[in-house]
Image (tube, rainbow, N blue to C red):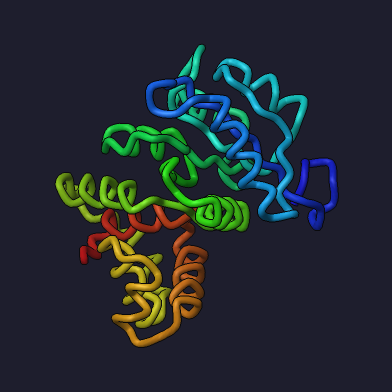
Amino acid sequence: MGDSGSTRNSAPWALPYDDADSDRRRPGRDKGRHQSDARLDPSLVVAGDLSDGLQVIPFLRDHPVDLVLMDIRMPGIDGVEATRRIRKEHPPEELRVIVLTTFDQDDIVLAALRAGANGFLSKTVSPAELVAGITEVVGGGGALSAAATAALIGHMTDSPPPVIDRELLRRFDALTPRERDVVVLVASGLGNDEIAAQMSVSPFTVKTHAVRAMTKVGARDRAQLVSFTFRAGLYP
């Protein structure tokens, strides 16, 4: 993947944003680390590095990218509002957004996902985990830290829909029994390795079932798959 004017076999672009919270992590150090992390995979190209949320839309108009790494706290506007503005011009399937922050509060996670983020990762993830998350999201999947998954599941469990979404439930009828089992376990907060151990299959098989399930029910990523599962009444 590359910019919208290039062929689809060119390198994906990553666009990091620097967090302005100097008490937690210095912006300069983050900038270097994120660029270095991206270089762990030669297919990742850093197209730009911005420090003000108000710069995001003008930059994207002139520099089409495949993925944005979005920090929560920035001058101008925060990462949630910047993501919301991105979604007014770029749908999730066209431009992916991963929110990257030191903060794991439930309200921040939920606000970012509602604004249209495809994933949510902590700044404490390892370089390999960051690259894996970027690769997963650029490929159409989702990336959620354990805290983000717990926040989403906790919110859905505490606030179940008053009426089951029958249209969504009909979509789940297309799943095989194995795919449905995987979906329910994903919605329970388990990762691929944990699901694989429980079902006595490989993590790759779990991922394959999850991706097929997302395609069948029309979920853009793992987070939306969890949301659909609860709205359809398929509680873990």
Residue at the limit of the structure toward the top, as seen here: 76
The percent position of residue 9, horizontal first and vertical second, equals: 81, 57
The picture places residue 17, in percent across and down from the top left corner, at 57, 29
Left or right: residue 180 compared with residue 61: left
- Residue 229 horizontal/vertical position (percent): 31, 60
In the picture shown, does residue 150 fall above or below 25?
A: below
Q: Is residue 167 visible?
A: no
The residue nearer to you, when weighing 50 against 226, is 50
Q: Residue at x 48, y 80 (%)?
A: 205
Give the quarter of the figure containing the C terminus.
bottom left
Taking the spot 40% from the left edge, 52% from the top edge, the residue there is 223
* Residue 129 left/right relative to 167: right
Q: Is residue 192 above or below residue 57?
A: below
Task: Name the spot of residue 208 as percent of width and height, x first.
Answer: 51, 74
Question: In this orientation, which residue lies closer to the viewer: 108 or 103?
Answer: 103
Q: For this view, does 119 lie left or right of residue 50?
A: left
The one nearer the camera, 33 or 5, is: 33
Would residue 77 be visible to someone looking at this image? yes
